[in-house]
Amino acid sequence: MGVSTCHHTALSVSASLTELTGVAARGVGVATGAIFILLAFLPKALAVVLAIPGPVVAGYLAVLMAMLFLVGIKVLLQD
Protein backbone atom coordinates (compact mmCIF):
# COMPACT_ATOMS: atom_id res chain seq x y z
CA MET A 1 0.00 0.00 0.00
CA GLY A 2 1.07 3.49 -0.72
CA VAL A 3 1.59 6.20 1.82
CA SER A 4 -1.64 8.01 0.97
CA THR A 5 -3.94 4.99 1.02
CA CYS A 6 -6.35 4.33 3.84
CA HIS A 7 -7.32 0.94 5.20
CA HIS A 8 -11.02 0.17 5.02
CA THR A 9 -11.70 -2.73 7.31
CA ALA A 10 -14.76 -4.01 9.06
CA LEU A 11 -14.69 -6.05 12.20
CA SER A 12 -16.56 -9.31 11.96
CA VAL A 13 -18.09 -8.72 15.38
CA SER A 14 -19.89 -5.64 14.07
CA ALA A 15 -22.02 -7.84 11.79
CA SER A 16 -23.38 -9.77 14.75
CA LEU A 17 -23.94 -6.59 16.77
CA THR A 18 -25.87 -5.10 13.87
CA GLU A 19 -27.96 -8.25 13.57
CA LEU A 20 -28.57 -8.41 17.31
CA THR A 21 -29.47 -4.75 17.86
CA GLY A 22 -30.73 -3.72 14.43
CA VAL A 23 -28.64 -0.54 14.65
CA ALA A 24 -26.11 0.13 11.91
CA ALA A 25 -25.84 3.93 12.00
CA ARG A 26 -22.37 5.43 11.96
CA GLY A 27 -23.47 8.04 14.51
CA VAL A 28 -24.09 5.30 17.07
CA GLY A 29 -20.52 4.08 16.62
CA VAL A 30 -19.16 7.61 16.98
CA ALA A 31 -21.25 8.16 20.12
CA THR A 32 -20.02 4.87 21.59
CA GLY A 33 -16.42 5.86 20.86
CA ALA A 34 -16.98 9.22 22.54
CA ILE A 35 -18.38 7.47 25.60
CA PHE A 36 -15.31 5.21 25.77
CA ILE A 37 -12.99 8.22 25.51
CA LEU A 38 -14.98 9.96 28.25
CA LEU A 39 -14.72 6.86 30.45
CA ALA A 40 -10.94 6.90 30.01
CA PHE A 41 -10.83 10.28 31.75
CA LEU A 42 -13.29 9.39 34.51
CA PRO A 43 -11.64 6.69 36.63
CA LYS A 44 -14.65 6.14 38.92
CA ALA A 45 -16.97 5.51 35.95
CA LEU A 46 -14.38 3.21 34.38
CA ALA A 47 -14.14 1.29 37.67
CA VAL A 48 -17.89 0.61 37.47
CA VAL A 49 -17.49 -0.81 33.96
CA LEU A 50 -14.49 -2.89 35.02
CA ALA A 51 -16.46 -4.25 38.00
CA ILE A 52 -18.71 -6.25 35.66
CA PRO A 53 -18.21 -9.90 36.70
CA GLY A 54 -16.30 -12.22 34.39
CA PRO A 55 -19.22 -14.63 33.89
CA VAL A 56 -21.41 -11.75 32.70
CA VAL A 57 -18.79 -10.73 30.16
CA ALA A 58 -18.39 -14.36 29.09
CA GLY A 59 -22.15 -14.67 28.62
CA TYR A 60 -22.19 -11.53 26.50
CA LEU A 61 -19.33 -12.83 24.38
CA ALA A 62 -21.02 -16.22 23.98
CA VAL A 63 -24.17 -14.55 22.64
CA LEU A 64 -22.06 -12.32 20.39
CA MET A 65 -20.14 -15.26 18.93
CA ALA A 66 -23.34 -17.29 18.45
CA MET A 67 -24.88 -14.36 16.56
CA LEU A 68 -21.73 -14.05 14.45
CA PHE A 69 -21.99 -17.75 13.62
CA LEU A 70 -25.65 -17.39 12.66
CA VAL A 71 -24.95 -14.35 10.47
CA GLY A 72 -22.23 -16.34 8.70
CA ILE A 73 -24.57 -19.28 8.11
CA LYS A 74 -27.23 -16.87 6.84
CA VAL A 75 -24.77 -15.40 4.33
CA LEU A 76 -23.72 -18.87 3.17
CA LEU A 77 -27.32 -19.96 2.64
CA GLN A 78 -28.24 -16.80 0.72
CA ASP A 79 -25.41 -17.12 -1.81
Image (cartoon, rainbow, N blue to C red):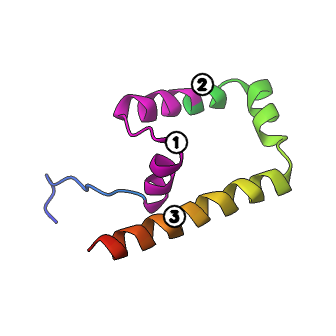
CA distance separating discs 2 and 1: 23 Å
Q: Amino acid at mark 2?
A: Leu
Q: Give, as a single range, the part of the protein colored magenta.
A: 12-35
Camera-side mark, 2 or 3: 3
Residue at 59 percent of width and 65 percent of height = 65
On the image, the x and y values in percent for residue 70 come to 50, 67
On the image, the x and y values in percent for residue 16 come to 49, 56
Mark sitting earlier along the chain (2/1):
1
Q: Secondary structure at mark 2?
A: helix
- The residue wearing badge 2 is 38
Residue 16 highlighted magenta (yes or no): yes
| Circle 3 crowding by C-alpha within 10 Å: few under 14, some 14–19, many from 20 | many
Residue 17 highlighted magenta (yes or no): yes
Residue at 16 percent of width and 56 percent of height = 3
CA distance separating discs 3 and 1: 13 Å
On the image, the x and y values in percent for residue 17 come to 51, 49
| Circle 2 crowding by C-alpha within 10 Å: few under 14, some 14–19, many from 20 | few
Residue at 64 percent of width and 31 percent of height = 40
The vertical placement of 69 against 25, above or below, is below
Mark sitting earlier along the chain (2/3):
2
| Circle 1 crowding by C-alpha within 10 Å: few under 14, some 14–19, many from 20 | few
Q: Count the marks.
A: 3
Tell me which corner region of the image, top left, top right, bottom left or bottom right, holds residue 35: top right
- The residue wearing badge 1 is 21
Where is the C terminus found, in terms of image quarters? Answer: bottom left
Q: Secondary structure at mark 3?
A: helix
